[in-house]
Every structure is written in C-alpha cells, then in structure tokens.
C-alpha cells in the first residue's frame, strides 16, 4: 500500500527479527507490549531528519486504498500540521504528520495511538472525507471476513 501510494522511504515498526518487504526499512520495537504509542514514537524517531512529513499507516489495515493515502498527501495545508481521514465526523488513520507535529507522539502512552489526540484537537486537523475507515484485521477470522468481502460482519 505504501509503495503503491508512492511513499518513500517506507519504515516498518516490527518486533525484532520480523521480516519486512525488501524495499522497507525495519524499525525494531523491542517492547510491542507497550502498545501503539511505543511503535509511533519509534517510527517517528526513525523518519529521516530532512523529511517534511510522515504518513502513519497501521499494519492491521490491509484493505486501505492507496488512493486514500494519496488524498491525504494532496490535502496538506500550511495552516495545519495534521491530516487525517474522516468518516461521519470521526478522524482516524491513516494520518499525515508534518515534521512540526512529530512532537505530538512524544506524549502518547499505551495502545491508543493518536485516537484521543485527534478527537481532542479536531480543529487542528485537515480532514479528508472517505467512505469508510478500513477494518482492523486482528484475527484469522477478521482476515477471512475481509477476504470474503464481509469486513463489517
């Protein structure tokens, strides 16, 4: 999805030793039990210093359309440092952070990621309307439903 959306470089925050595609840069997370916030901090810390922004994709959303990522990039606004997809007023990943907003992840804890920040700071976010947020695929049953075209079941 990241390559199809023309993201470069592609950083993958993974447990130590987990294989990533050959064109991705592994960012080892020695403590995945600390939750999504730990992965976000590690990923943002690994972004090249000269990067203007970072797009945050979640590994458990394999049905994300690359077009949604391209729309995020196209919606960048010099007045706001965050761009996120929105459905029915709910902001959620994928999320684009301008480099000036990287500091947001420093204060995150647990397995919530940017969810609470997005909800509390919607006025600072450029929304990109999408038809639906991609479903999380956390279990073999979830994967089966996505493959069968019943992601919401």
Image (tube, rainbow, N blue to C red):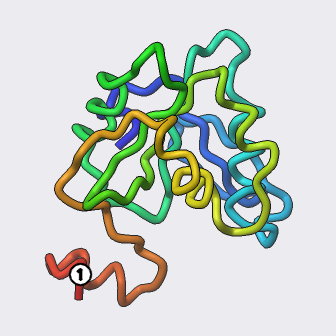
Near-viewer residue (90 or 142):
90
Which residue is outermost to the front? 123
Left/right of residue 135 with respect to residue 65 in the rendered view? right
Q: Is residue 95 above or below residue 76?
A: below
Q: Is residue 111 above or below residue 54?
A: below
* Image coords of residue 40 (percent x, y): 69, 48
* Image coords of residue 139 (percent x, y): 46, 84
Near-viewer residue (33 or 89):
89
Quarter of the image where the N terminus is located: top left
Q: SS for tag 1? A: loop
Which residue is outermost to the top? 50
* Image coords of residue 64 (percent x, y): 30, 53
User: What residue is shown with label 1?
Assistant: 152
Picture residue at 41% right of the left edge, 42% below the top: 84
Picture residue at 51% right of the left edge, 33% below the top: 82
Picture residue at 36% right of the left edge, 25% below the top: 73
Left/right of residue 37 with respect to residue 60 in the rendered view? right
- Tell me the crowding category of disc 1: few under 14, some 14 to 19, or many 20 or more residues within 10 angstroms, Cα based: few
Picture residue at 30% right of the left edge, 22% below the top: 74
Quarter of the image where the C terminus is located: bottom left
Which residue is outermost to the right? 30
Q: Is residue 116 above or below residue 148?
A: above
């Amino acid at each position: 999805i990241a390559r199809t959306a023309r993201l470069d470089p592609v950083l993958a925050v993974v447990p130590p030793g987990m294989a990533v595609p050959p064109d991705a840069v592994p960012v080892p997370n020695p403590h995945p039990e600390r939750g999504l916030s730990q992965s976000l901090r590690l990923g943002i810390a690994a972004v090249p210093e000269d990067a203007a922004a970072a797009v945050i994709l979640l590994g458990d959303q394999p049905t994300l359309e690359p077009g949604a990522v391209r729309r995020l990039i196209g919606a960048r606004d010099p007045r706001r440092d965050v761009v996120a997809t929105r459905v029915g007023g709910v902001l959620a990943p994928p999320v684009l952070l301008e480099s000036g907003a990287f500091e947001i992840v420093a204060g995150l804890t647990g397995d919530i990621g940017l969810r609470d920040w997005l909800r509390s700071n919607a006025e600072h976010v450029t929304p990109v309307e999408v038809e639906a947020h991609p479903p999380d695929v956390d279990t073999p049953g979830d994967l089966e439903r996505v493959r069968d075209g019943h992601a919401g079941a």
